[in-house]
Amino acid sequence: MVYSYTEKKRIRKDFGKRPQVLDVPYLLSIQLDSFQKFIEQDPEGQYGLEAAFRSVFPIQSYSGNSELQYVSYRLGEPVFDVKECQIRGVTYSAPLRVKLRLVIYEREAPEGTVKDIKEQEVYMGEIPLMTDNGTFVINGTERVIVSQLHRSPGVFFDSDKGKTHSSGKVLYNARIIPYRGSWLDFEFDPKDNLFVRIDRRRKLPATIILRALNYTTEQILDLFFEKVVFEIRDNKLQMELIPERLRGETASFDIEANGKVYVEKGRRITARHIRQLEKDDIKHIEVPVEYIAGKVAAKDYIDEATGELICPANMELSLDLLAKLSPVWPQAYRNAVHQRSGPRPVHL
């Protein structure tokens, strides 16, 4: 005769035409066995708390003179039983105590020479315990654990499909999901400024992350921007020509070389002009000083005679600043000025 799994053990009557081949399994056994496997000590360290502690320890100091090792753990007895926790409105849990070993090594002795060893049991917190019903009592309320979806670790790229901003501009974003740790969200705003969020919190300039990774202003400009190299030749300012970068722009001066005018002032630079410049192997063209005004310096310019910093990297170049740079430029043969659209420098 089949009985129910409730406390009253009522008889279950079967009105089916087919005979019952297998009994209904005890469904709570999955949760109970899984939790028991989680809290009990595993000598091999493949499951539960034992595997978690072994994945973190040992922890070494930055100098390498000391090491914190994991020895074992134990769970104490709960202070109150399930009914008492429900009445008092507290969590049904047991104290978790971990035995740790601190190993201190000799500084000047050969590597691995132990100076002192200390062992101590440390209170790590409370571990909620599962009741016989497969539930947890949290703050006096009986709760169950339900499965939820978890994003796979990796890098994911997405866009808002032009629905965020009123202009309809498509804003792209990227999300870095680690196996363990904080999420990083990179996103553009309508002005093409790049920002970062840590764990979906306040929006910060992306350069703060790069600064934290010890990147300098020059290195950041090298990563994200192209450069235009200017040189002083025969007291004339010449620019290293990369024809592909000029496609689609409107010439602000006559682009000429070897006495031949390739693009007249005010004309748009087309693919035909690019092919002609590449065919004639034009590497440098003469440019007026005003062409540099409004661009951004990609390096620090220092007066070698006095050691004075005349122009720091990422500073917008003006005609007055170019006048100060004029005695410095012949000293440095190659001078890179960052090329970017817009009159303002990038704030780093």
Image: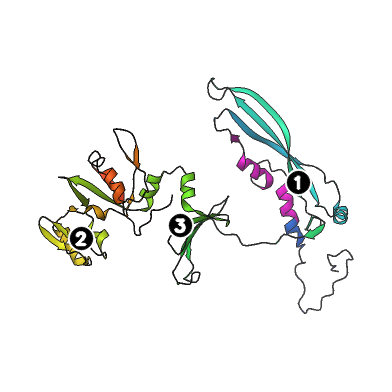
Badge 3 amino acid: Leu
Q: Which residue is mark 3?
A: 194
Side (left or right) of 97 relative to 299: right
Element under disc 2: loop
N-terminal of the pair, mark 3 or mark 1, is: 1
Side (left or right) of 74 relative to 88: left
Report, in whole angstroms, how far the alpha carbon at label 3 lies from the one at label 1: 42 Å
- Residue, far right: 8
- The residue shown at (77%, 72%) is 20
Report, in whole angstroms, how far the alpha carbon at label 2 lies from the one at label 1: 75 Å
User: For the residue carrying disc 3, how many other residues have a C-alpha within 10 Å: few (<14), some (14-19), or many (20+)?
Assistant: some
- The residue shown at (79%, 49%) is 93
Report, in whole angstroms, how far the alpha carbon at label 3 lies from the one at label 2: 33 Å
The boundaries of the magenta stretch are 32-61
Residue 42 sits in which quadrant?
Answer: top right
Look at the image and name its color scheme.
rainbow
N-terminal of the pair, mark 3 or mark 2, is: 3
Q: Residue 103: where, in percent of width, then height?
A: 63, 28
User: For the residue carrying disc 2, how many other residues have a C-alpha within 10 Å: few (<14), some (14-19), or many (20+)?
Assistant: some
Q: Which residue is mark 2?
A: 253
Residue 233 in the magenta stretch? The answer is no
- The residue shown at (50%, 55%) is 196
Which of 109 and 248 lies nearest the eye of the viewer? 248
Badge 1 amino acid: Glu
User: For the residue carrying disc 1, how many other residues have a C-alpha within 10 Å: few (<14), some (14-19), or many (20+)?
Assistant: some
Element under disc 1: strand
Side (left or right) of 90 relative to 340: right
